[in-house]
Amino acid sequence: MKIKAAVVEKVGDPFVIKDDIDLHEVGPTDVQVHMVASGICHSDEAIRKGDASLGYPVILGHEGAGIVEKVGSEVQNLKPGDHVVMAFYADGLCDKCLSGIPTQCRHYADYNLSGVRFDGEDQFQENGKHISDMFNQSSFTTTTVTNQRNCVKVDDDVDLRKVGPLGCGYITGSGTVFNTLKPRPGQTIAVFGTGAVGLAAMMAGKISGCTKVIAVDIVPSRLELAKELGATDAINSKQEDPVAKIKELTGGYGVDYAVDTTGVSAVMKSGIDALAQGGTLAAIAVTPNNLEFSTWNDLCTNDRKVIGVNMGDAIPQIDIPRLIAFNKLGMFDFEKTEKFYDFEDINQADADSVSGKTIKPVLIIDKDYEPSK
């Protein structure tokens, strides 16, 4: 079938919306989804500008939400009319998946970052020519075909315009705290960078019972939002030394945990320096930058750790409903980071994300969609 999609023709090109894209038919374990909305993530921009590549031309987008239109013959847990949020694909069969860590799926790269379907076929074509896909999803489309394992069913009363980013940005930030760092009540955490991922991590720190939840950024409006969402303290690192201030706020010790979402080398190093003895830095940004440190002075003598975390070590079918439940309780107000854009304004939305004007742009693909009351 023919669909409309936003295509990046080559490295650094803007998005071009085309209406002549051929979509792969629904296979036995596939689900065809009518797209309602999709978040824009910094990973989309990283691929668009060439920091990473799936091959070009490419259709990006991996924070999609929509309504199931058709299911394959072997699909068991979804039916037409179901509302879904889409996340990454994991096979569910390898030792990592069976151990409960699908973000470490042995075939993660093959399924999500190869530019083709898991069976090696093209997900999209134009005039018979290959177009790469992303995360076995490519949500910058009016309709897509994905796998049942990409999909998380949500209640019909959940506003699909808001929840797409739960599939990546929000589970990455919150999952890093809930699933990986696992702070105990009374411990302390600092989050460097208050974009969508950082604010999600910060809110998770608050929910976990951290007595100090410290937000670090250089944008005053974001720091104000961080305090509104539960930060106990906010530090403008343009105006004061964040490491010195964090130690002042923690009795001279530093924090038990730090999360870096910036990918800036100097900021990541500050994250290490701000740790208490035995502390852990989670570096989770998609970045080409390096982190340099002294193994002896920065890590060993203070028993500190630096770890990387992919997608918040999340199990989307568990983590996404959990975040929606927290949201309904007023504990995870992720929608305060979002701004809606028409699908046709995708380049403006992406530019506003890059500049920091908008924390989490969300493309409204189906403008006729109305959430249930």
Image (cartoon, rainbow, N blue to C red):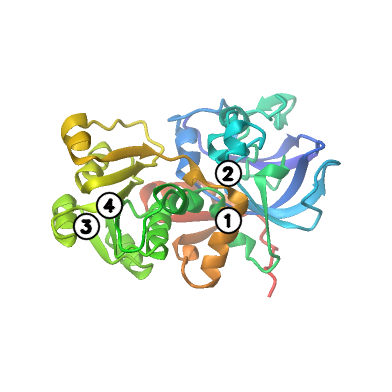
- Residue 268's disc number: none
Q: Earlier in the sequence, mark 4 or mark 1?
A: 4
Is the residue marked by circle 4 packed among few (<14), some (14-19), or many (20+) residues within 10 Å? many
The residue under label 3 is 236
* 328 vs 73: above or below: below
Residue lying at 36% horizontally and 31% vertically, measured from the top left: 288
* 31 vs 57: above or below: below
Residue 129 seen by the camera: yes
The residue under label 4 is 256
Quadrant in the picture for residue 57: top right
Is the residue marked by circle 1 packed among few (<14), some (14-19), or many (20+) residues within 10 Å? many
The residue under label 2 is 62
Please identify the quadrant where the C terminus is shown.
bottom right
Is the residue marked by circle 3 packed among few (<14), some (14-19), or many (20+) residues within 10 Å? some
Front-lying residue, 318 or 33: 318
Q: Is residue 174 left or right of residue 7?
A: left
Residue lying at 63% horizontally and 33% vertically, measured from the top left: 133
Q: Earlier in the sequence, mark 2 or mark 3?
A: 2
Front-lying residue, 344 or 264: 264
Identify the secondary structure beneath mark 1: helix
Q: Amino acid at mark 4?
A: Asp
